[in-house]
Image: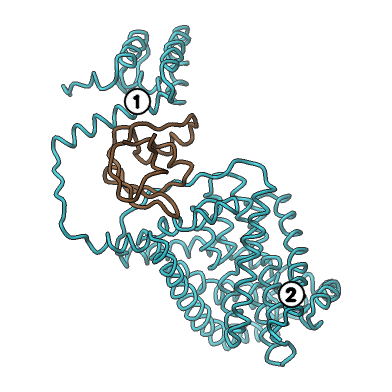
Chain colours: A cyan, B brown
């Protein structure tokens, strides 16, 4: 270790280092020079250690640090890092040669296309369409769920459980707790294993591919300007995109945002205006037969997303978010990495979600016993009628809270019976999308944002969804857009 | 004074200064290796600012871009 390390910094800093080195008496794991540099940068652990080992001299050291700090406008850690950066450049320049390739590589071209908004936005829409709609919505929520739910649980496991219960359990309360329509196994576990797992599994698969390709920072860059208007920065695109998979998971991921303000706004928007894959699957298939209805729904939900985000950003105190992100080079994802990631996430997610679903089926079981559901449906009825929907839709809303897709699936039955007009279908689909999140998401909101905030958000969403449904119905009636 | 926020796409130069008294911005730029003396190339200016510093590509918003003084 004979490398000459002095003279990297300017005289003032070198002097300060020397002064501190002369004072230091304690025994440190690193050299006194390195330790002095840490102290100058006000490293918390180093300060703590010096306070302990240097006794009276500690104050002298603090004095030197303060005096040195006053010499510079910028934090010392920045000044010191700047000198190091220069030194690093001198070293690399002396040993590295950069050859300029004549041809632009394919990944470089792709990078430009993705960054340019004119080509980047259509690409983003294509990624969402194929990744979310085709793969997660139609393959995951359609093909796999149909197989697991219909052929495995519906045809084999549920009848088998019910059979055992009916033959061996004499108590009705225990039979309905475990089996039947809302039992722990027949509803809770079936829901977690046969519906949620394939949907989030396919979603995680797509998400891991997008993540490993390095596409997310580029998407974040594209939406940053838009997101600034709703009090978020481009980084929030990650929980928002995740929300299209599962809002519960996305609410959990919103903890990665930097400020509490951003976390609250994104939790609110996820609860209100981001439909999860289970909902999306059903709503898209309901509305796809009526292109005008589908467009009306998309416009309305996007409007609510931006409008409420804008208002929330105005109302909530706190600083405007900053956006900064390193853009890793684009890479072709490795299948083995994607599979390992998908598997680990599914495993972790399943452990989080399974207890919740068991809890939910116990709730429903209990609610049925005390007969609270007909009363709740009764409470919803006048509101449902007020937004121009037939009263049968009330039940759909109640079940929507327990199972987001179940609510939407309930609409499906009503459409088949021919009860809803196109206008009513759009109003119902929009209100249901906005309506309170499923119970799992609500529990996650409490866990992540605290009880008070979660309740505020839930009450707001409940009131606002009916208000918005009322307004939408009125607009559609007044303009005759879907007549 | 030229900052990254008022440059054209394709500009190549050197970072002279990070002009801000906000420690959080300085720390963020530091973390991404953006220092005075680094060479810089502007890749894009809309909807956000993307530039190359050394071997790294970085995206920032207007607020941060306007603190990076270049020549």
Q: Which residue is mark 1?
A: A80
How many callouts does the rendering have?
Answer: 2
**Which of the 4 image quadrants contains residue A43?**
top left
Q: Residue at image x 38%, y 65%?
A: A209
Which badge, 2 or 1, is on the more N-terminal residue? 1
Packing grade of label 2 (10 A; few <14, some 14-19, many >=20) is few
Q: Nearer the viewer, residue A326 or A211?
A: A326
| Residue B45 falls left or right of residue A155 | left
Q: Give a yes or no on whether discs 2 and 1 share a subunit.
A: yes
Give me the chain letter of mark 2.
A
Q: Residue at image x 37%, y 50%?
A: B50
Measured as percent of width and height from the top left, residue A250 is found at 55, 60
Measured as percent of width and height from the top left, residue A86 is found at 26, 30
Measured as percent of width and height from the top left, residue A371 is found at 84, 74
Q: Are marks 2 and 1 in contact (CB under 8 Å)?
A: no
Distance from disc 2 to disc 1, alpha carbons, whole Å, reads 62 Å
Q: Residue at image x 24%, y 33%?
A: A88
Q: Is residue A361 visible?
A: yes
Q: Up-down: is A439 above or below A326?
A: below
**Which of the 4 image quadrants contains residue A391?**
bottom right
| Residue A150 falls left or right of residue A443 | left
Give me the chain letter of mark 1.
A
Q: Which residue is mark 2?
A: A475
Q: Up-down: is A457 above or below A368?
A: above
């Amino acid at each position: 270790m004979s490398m000459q390390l002095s003279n990297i910094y300017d005289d003032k800093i070198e002097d300060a280092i020397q002064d501190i080195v002369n004072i230091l008496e304690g025994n440190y794991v690193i050299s006194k020079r390195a330790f002095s540099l840490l102290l100058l940068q006000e490293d918390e652990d180093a300060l703590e250690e010096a306070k302990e080992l240097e006794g009276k001299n500690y104050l002298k050291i603090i004095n030197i640090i303060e005096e040195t700090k006053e010499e510079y406008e910028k934090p010392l850690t920045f000044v010191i890092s700047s000198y190091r950066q220069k030194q690093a450049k001198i070293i690399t320049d002396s040993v590295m040669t950069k050859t300029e390739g004549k041809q632009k590589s394919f990944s470089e071209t792709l990078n430009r296309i993705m960054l340019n908004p004119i080509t980047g936005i259509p690409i983003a829409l294509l990624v969402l369409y194929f990744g979310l709609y085709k793969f997660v919505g139609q393959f995951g929520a359609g093909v796999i769920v149909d197989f697991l739910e219909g052929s495995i649980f519906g045809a084999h496991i549920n009848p088998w459980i019910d059979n055992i219960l009916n033959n061996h359990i004499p108590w009705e309360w225990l039979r309905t707790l475990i089996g039947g329509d809302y039992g722990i196994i027949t509803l809770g576990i079936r829901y977690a294993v046969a519906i949620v797992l394939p949907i989030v599994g396919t979603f995680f698969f797509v998400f891991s591919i997008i993540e490993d390709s390095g596409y997310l920072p580029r998407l974040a860059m594209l939406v940053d300007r838009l997101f600034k208007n709703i009090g978020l920065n481009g980084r929030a695109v990650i929980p928002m995109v995740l929300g299209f998979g599962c809002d519960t998971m996305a609410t959990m991921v919103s903890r990665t945002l930097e400020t509490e303000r951003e976390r609250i706004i994104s939790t609110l928007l996820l609860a209100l205006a981001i439909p999860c894959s289970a909902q999306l699957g059903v709503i898209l298939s309901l509305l796809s037969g009526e292109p005008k209805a589908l467009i009306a729904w998309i416009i309305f939900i996007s409007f609510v997303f931006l409008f409420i985000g804008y208002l929330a950003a105005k109302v909530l105190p706190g600083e405007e978010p900053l956006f900064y992100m390193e853009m890793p080079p684009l890479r072709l994802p490795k299948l083995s990495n994607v599979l390992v990631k998908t598997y680990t996430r599914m495993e972790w997610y399943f452990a989080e979600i399974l207890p919740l679903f068991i809890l939910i089926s116990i709730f429903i079981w209990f609610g049925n016993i005390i007969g609270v559901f007909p009363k709740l449906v009764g409470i919803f009825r006048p509101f449902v009628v007020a937004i121009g929907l037939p009263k049968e839709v009330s039940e759909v809303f109640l079940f929507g809270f327990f199972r987001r897709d179940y609510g939407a699936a309930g609409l499906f039955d009503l459409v088949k019976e021919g009860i809803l007009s196109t206008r009513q279908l759009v109003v119902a689909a929009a209100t249901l999308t906005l309506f309170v999140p499923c119970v799992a998401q609500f529990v996650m909101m409490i866990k992540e944002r605290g009880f008070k905030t979660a309740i505020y958000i839930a009450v707001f969403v409940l009131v606002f969804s009916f208000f918005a449904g009322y307004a939408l119905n009125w607009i559609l009636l007044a303009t005759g857009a879907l007549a | 004074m030229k900052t990254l926020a008022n440059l054209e796409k394709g500009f190549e130069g050197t970072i002279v200064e990070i002009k801000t008294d906000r420690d959080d911005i300085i720390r963020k730029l530091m973390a991404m290796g953006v220092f005075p003396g680094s060479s810089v190339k502007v890749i894009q200016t809309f909807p956000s600012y993307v530039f190359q510093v050394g071997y790294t590509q970085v995206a920032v918003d207007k607020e941060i871009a306007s603190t990076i003084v270049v020549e």
